[in-house]
Image (cartoon, rainbow, N blue to C red):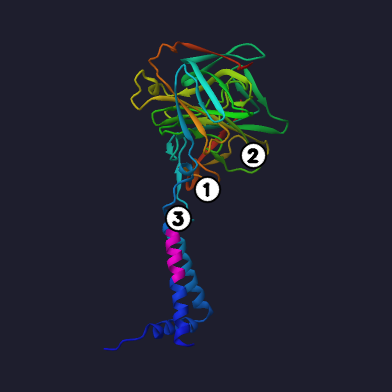
Amino acid sequence: MTSSAALRGATRALASAAVIAAGAVVSQNLPAGSEIYAPFPVAGVLGEAAGGRGITATVTGVQIAPEVLVTPKVGAPKSFSAIGQWVVVQTSMRPGDRTEFAHADLTAGPRTYLPTDRLPPGSTLGGTIQPGFVSRGAWVFDVAPDALDSAPRDGPVTLRAWVGDGRLDSRLEINLVLGDSRVVRSQRAEVSAPEVVPG
Amino acid sequence: MSVSRPGARAQSLTSRLAGLGPRRLGKVAAVLGLAVTAAFGGLDRVDPSVTAVKPGQSYDDGALAITVKRARLVPTLTAGDRVLSTAEPGSQYLAVVAALANDGTEPVPLGREIDLLATEATQVGAFRLADGTSTAYLGPGLSDEFAFVWQLPETVLRPGQTVSLRIWKKQYRELMVGSGKGWVDGTDYGVVELTAESRR
């Protein structure tokens, strides 16, 4: 082997090592998928419509109670107890110009809550929303009581709502001021099956 | 003092590699492969740490503090006087009662919280002990007792026999598939062994 051929081989090996090392550095410093595809927040407040791509929602009232009485479309009303406290967020929602699948969660400071799955199916919001119609109903969350002080020590309580998988899309973030007169604390909240009306 | 030319040094390295033979070359390739793997984040451990957990003893799995209390074989699932489900002939339900506490900030799925180390068992779900409602998650800041239920043939497990349960340590991290974060099982786990109580 000539010295020039050996030099070319060594150069290739060094270049390959440099590319692999650079790849390792890049792979260790890539932004996380949850950051790359993060939704675009749209701020909203209690009682006013918040609109983003694919969804417009208005929170009309909030109930906080240890018990909830659910009146389904079919069958007798039934009461359910919370592990913590029920937070019932009365909401009206409509999509843009096509059918969408609506989701929501509730944040209380650093904590995140999913809608409860302990109530009868169809008694709460969640699912498809149709263009030309307004869906009125409740998102219901089972929340730790210490997250629901009038002045939450860990930060605000926020309903977040979006459609589809939420990636690179609007996410409504509606601040629920717990001292507001439309936030009612009682021993028993009431939930009725969602209704869909033209609008 | 002697000075060697770069070409001569490269030629020397090439010659030495050529003289190593297939087995040594394989070892060199394996070491290089491990070095590159380490540079990209390394490999997971393959020797899991196993913790023996006694019934009634709290175990922190990274997501929940879980205390497995008892296991009972029953022919029917009930909540108070309400019958939730009756097992088919020849099968039965195993209900494992555990107290859970979520001291974190994210909801924790309950569907894969406890693995029953038994074949032919089908997981039914997790039910809140207080009212029999089924749920798939426990929210942050909440604690309660739940029954984890499986359906299995009567011949697989009889009253008085030992039930082995595995509780995986979990991490909340970026998901490899799709986007977003979620709870992912690690390699370490706790094992709880308890006696199946007789059906009522």
Q: Is residue A93 left or right of residue B32?
A: right
User: Residue B86 placed where, x, y %?
Assistant: 68, 26
Q: Residues within 10 Å of mark 2 (few under 14, many from 20)?
A: some
In the drawing, what numbered circle is on residue A27?
3
User: Is label 3 or label 2 in front?
Assistant: 3
Both marks 2 and 1 on one chain? yes
Q: Is residue A134 above or below residue A100?
A: above
Chief secondary structure of the magenta portion = helix
**Residue B106 visible here:** yes
Q: Chain of mark 3?
A: A
Q: Residue lying furthest front in this view?
A: A97
| Cα–Cα span, label 1 and label 3 | 14 Å
Q: Chain of mark 1?
A: B
Instruction: Report the residue at 66% width, 25% height from top.
Output: B85
Q: Amino acid at mark 3?
A: Ser
Q: Is residue A169 above or below residue A191?
A: below
- Between residues A47 and B31, which one lies in front from this camera angle? A47
Instruction: Report the residue at 38% width, 23% height from top.
Output: A146
Instruction: Report the residue at 49% width, 69% height from top.
Output: B30
> Is tag 2's residue or tag 1's residue first in the polypeptide sequence?
2
Instruction: Report the residue at 42% width, 85% height from top.
Output: B12
| Cα–Cα span, label 3 and label 2 | 41 Å
Q: Amino acid at mark 2?
A: Ala
User: Residue B120 placed where, x, y %?
Assistant: 66, 41
The answer to whether residue B3 is magenta is no
Both marks 3 and 2 on one chain? no
For the magenta stretch, what is the residue range? A15-24
User: Is label 1 or label 3 in front?
Assistant: 3
Q: Amino acid at mark 1?
A: Met
Residue picked out by circle 2:
B121
Residue picked out by circle 1:
B176
